[in-house]
Image (cartoon, rainbow, N blue to C red):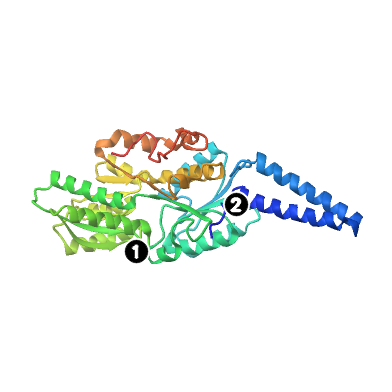
Amino acid sequence: MKQCNPNAFCRKCISSAYRKLKGALYQSTRACHDRPDDSARSINSISLGLWLLCFCLISTPLQAHHTPLKIAFFTTRQADDAYWGQVTAAMSAACRDLGIQLEVFYAGGNHITLIEQVESALKSPRRFDAIVVPNFKKTAHRNIKAAEQYKVPLLLFNSEISADRQLEMGLPREHFNYWIGTIVPDERQAGYRLAENLLKEAEKTLDHPATTMVAIGGNLADFSSINRLKGMEQAVKEHPQLQLLQTVHANWNRKTAAQMYHRLHQRYPNNTVVWTASDLMALGVLDQASTAQRTVITGGVDWTQQGLESIIQGELSFSLGGHYFNGAWAAVMLYDYFHGRDFKQESVRILTPMLPLGITQSETIKQLLHQRIWEKVNFRLYSKALNPDITHYNFSVPGLEPE
């Protein structure tokens, strides 16, 4: 059975209550002859209820929300994490523009902590209007069910339901009404474009008819790592001159990536190209290559400050990113949801692009490094509720458009 929007004034529900009150008024009127004093009080109370319901039907816009929204945002790492720090900074800027109260929780790399934090927030007397949660180590199904239990809208952030849970969970609003949507970067596209750019760089600098490559993924269970690797594998299939020798995992850790690369180089001493699923792991590869005085062509994902600085210094070849703005875009989506422009009109699954940066975009990189660009953005301009002419979200990095 289709359920009402959990945070909208529903005319069907109000009309149903109106009919019930009208029936009660009729019954009270018939009872007047038996208990005139009690019936008179009942009639007065019911009449007041009818008047208030009529007022709601006439004057209340659907999905009106006039008090400041309170949103809880859950991150997987610490407050000083290179990637999550950017995400929360951009989201905080958007929330300030939109008048949203934001509270951020840090799980410190522990998925059990994240589950406990979500449960605590849902029970909190502060009563959050919505929560924004990643699918950290395949925990999304538990948090979605908890949000359904406490009737708090949940937006799944930067990661989707894992394949083994898709049949059970369905799509947003299909089986769970309070799982209202998903915003996710195009991870496959990022993995594909990174492999493609590394291949082009290798063909320019290496005198080989064919190019070999090794790959270092993040966490085995992370949506981001899984899909970036799938994109990379698709690029290998479509470029026969590119041969993938082996894929390993370093759990998003710089030191572990350095160790993994050391072992890979021992096994494949003639290989030069290293695809990695994050800037941090690419920097680990460079650490080991520098120690051993080896030449390496590598790149990552995330647009971290260290990664972009490494590109300027001529070390890291590429980084794809911009998805740290997704926290800000999530705030825009929730603002619209609570102000009469539900994003489901476009889609319950919003996909955002990630853009590649290399040494040829050095001026853009310097701008990103030295300016907190989200502080210069008016996020109110991206809201459909505040800008009725917008029909499709433009959730790219402000000032940078995808190729």
Q: Is residue 7 left or right of residue 290?
A: right
Looking at the picture, tell me which residue is in the foreground, 105 or 181.
181
Q: Quadrant of residue 200?
A: top left
Residue in the foreground of this view, choosing between 187 and 341: 341
Tell which tag, 1 or 2, sits nearer the viewer.
2
From the top left corner, tell me how far across and down residue 258 is, in percent.
28, 58
Give me the disc on residue 185. Answer: none
Identified by mark 1, the residue type is Leu
The residue to which callout 2 is attached is 128
- The image quadrant that residue 216 belongs to is bottom left
Q: Amino acid at mark 2?
A: Phe
Q: Residue at x 79, y 48 (%)?
A: 47
Tally the marks. Answer: 2
Secondary structure, mark 2, is loop
The mark nearer the N terminus, 1 or 2, is 2
Quarter of the image that includes the C terminus:
top left
Residue at x-position 41% and y-position 65%: 167
Mark 1 = which residue?
220
Q: Examine the rendered structure and indicate whether residue 55 appears above or below residue 5.
A: above
Q: Secondary structure at mark 1?
A: loop
- Mark 2 crowd level (few <14, some 14–19, many ≥20, 10 Å Cα): some
The correct choice, above or below, for 152 with respect to 336 in the image is below
